[in-house]
Image (cartoon, helix red, strand yellow):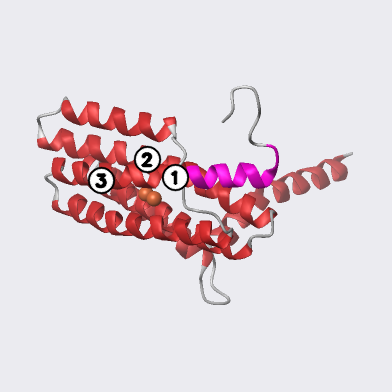
Amino acid sequence: MGLFSKDIKTMEDLYVHGLQDIYYAENRILRALPKMIEKTADGELKRGFQTHLKETENQVKRLERVFAMHDREAQGHKCPAIDGIIREAEDVMGEIEDPAVMNTAVIALAQAVEHYEITRYGALMAWATGLGHRQSAKLLAETLKEEKATDAKLTAIAERRINPRGDKSTARRARKKTSGRKTPAGKKTTRSVARRSASRPARKTTRRKSAARRHA
Ligand SMILES: [Fe+2]
Ligand SMILES: [Fe+2]
């Protein structure tokens, strides 16, 4: 970015800047993930990170395809946000000895990275759509889906490891939600029961009003 000029003039410039920013971030994450894998002693977490490492390699290639679609060379733009998130993760991991504490910390630190990626891909996808770059938007949406899935997996592991009771109640809530949505025709759904109980006080009020009219 120029000292005296403003390089981002149009939405297209902003979009390309965003692509360069996330390209830098993905490459930075590629270098950070092996350290997280090395630090965690939990098998499920390790496997999860290994899977995401492969996905991240593919996400870099996907971004290169997006750059190519716009006749641009894939190029990163230094992103202080991801540098800060990763530097903090490395500092915190360097301060922990206990393996259980390490697993808990690594999950939260990795989720900070995922959340950052989710916001960036969400914006890029919307901008690509707005600018009429449908194919690019489609590719960016694929990555966004992977980042969200990784975040959800990390949440599930955290709930099982850190708060097993919370995990059970989450599962119960999920079951209730599903049973409320998809039930065979004619059967009562959670929503219909909720609607019915919400309508009860209204009927009572009507009855009370008509009784008052009779006495008047
Ligand atoms: Fe990524
Ligand atoms: Fe990611």
Instruction: Say which residue label 1 marks.
Output: 117
Identify the secondary structure beneath mark 1: helix
Instruction: Say which residue label 3 marks.
Output: 33
State the CA–CA distance, disc 2 to disc 1.
6 Å
The location of residue 140, given as percent across then percent down, is 51, 57
Could you tell me which residue is drawn at 87 percent across and 43 percent down?
A: 213
Q: Specify whether 27 is left or right of 145.
A: left
**Residue 68 on the magenta segment:** no
Nearest to N terminus: mark 3 or mark 2? 3
Mark 3 touching mark 2, by CB under 8 A? no
* Quadrant in the picture for the C terminus: top right
* Residue extent of the magenta highlight: 9-20
Q: From the viewer's perspective, is residue 125 above or below residue 25? A: below
**Residue 18 on the magenta segment:** yes
Mark 2 touching mark 1, by CB under 8 A? yes
Q: Ligand 2 within 8 A of label 3's CB?
A: no
Instruction: Say which residue label 2 marks.
Output: 113
Q: Callout 2, which amino acid?
A: Val
Quarter occupied by residue 17: top right
Q: Ligand 2 within 8 A of label 2's CB?
A: yes
Nearest to N terminus: mark 3 or mark 1? 3
Count of numbered tags: 3
The location of residue 171, given as percent across then percent down, is 34, 54
Q: Ligand 2 within 8 A of label 1's CB?
A: yes
State the CA–CA distance, disc 3 to disc 1.
14 Å
Q: Closest to the observer: 95 or 181?
A: 95
Could you tell me which residue is drawn at 44 percent across and 45 percent down?
A: 117
Q: Specify whether 169 is left or right of 187.
A: left
Q: Closest to the observer: 17 or 54?
A: 17
